[in-house]
Amino acid sequence: MSISRNEARQVAHLARLEVDESDIDSITEELSAIIGFMAQLAEVDIEGVEPMTSVTPMRLSKRADVVASGGIRDRILATAPAVEQGFFTVPKVVE
């Protein structure tokens, strides 16, 4: 499948790309090649193939969900550039 020059202009407009008129033919060919490759991929039989998130088998490492004693607020606030009444303070950015 190929796209027309007008369709290539429309795609460039939707993508907010400024394209010179001299480059439209090149972009039309490239987009047509991409669409052709996508059509080729659509023909692949994937029946029974499990979806993958990586090419190497991996498992997500998990940490134990344990309750910590906490009580380190003062140590955390000691690293802050500005503290007021036990909270981080930041400069006002919205009027």
Image: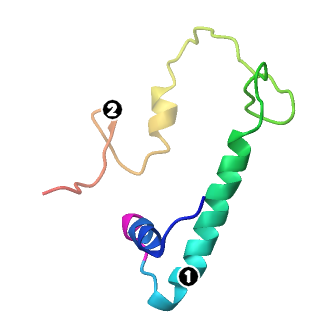
Whole-percent x, y for residue 53 in the image:
73, 32
Residue at horizontal 31 percent and vertical 50 percent from the top: 90
- Which image quarter is the C terminus in? bottom left
Residue at horizontal 45 percent and vertical 82 percent from the top: 19
* Of the two numbered discs 2 and 1 in the rendering, the one whose residue sits closer to the viewer: 1
Residue at horizontal 79 percent and vertical 22 percent from the top: 59
**As rendered, which of 12 and 6 lies closer to the eye?**
6
- Which image quarter is the N terminus in? bottom right
Residue labelled with disc 2 = 86
Q: Is residue 85 left or right of residue 60?
A: left
Q: Which mark is residue 25?
A: 1
Q: Is residue 84 above or below residue 5?
A: above
Extent of the magenta region: 13-17
Residue reaching furthest right? 56
Mark 1 crowd level (few <14, some 14–19, many ≥20, 10 Å Cα): some
Whole-percent x, y for residue 74 in the image:
46, 31
Q: Is residue 44 above or below residue 36?
A: above
Q: Quadrant of residue 51?
A: top right
Mark 2 crowd level (few <14, some 14–19, many ≥20, 10 Å Cα): few
Query: Quick check: is 51 in the magenta stretch?
Result: no
- Label 2 element class: loop
What count of labels does the image hold? 2
Q: Amino acid at mark 2?
A: Gly
Q: Is residue 67 above or below residue 60?
A: above
Whole-percent x, y for residue 78 in the image:
47, 40
Please, what is the dominant secondary structure of the magenta stretch?
loop
Display colour scheme: rainbow
Q: Amino acid at mark 1?
A: Asp
Sequence-first tag of 2 and 1: 1
Q: Is residue 84 left or right of residue 11?
A: left
Residue at horizontal 31 percent and vertical 45 percent from the top: 89
Whole-percent x, y for residue 63 in the image:
71, 17
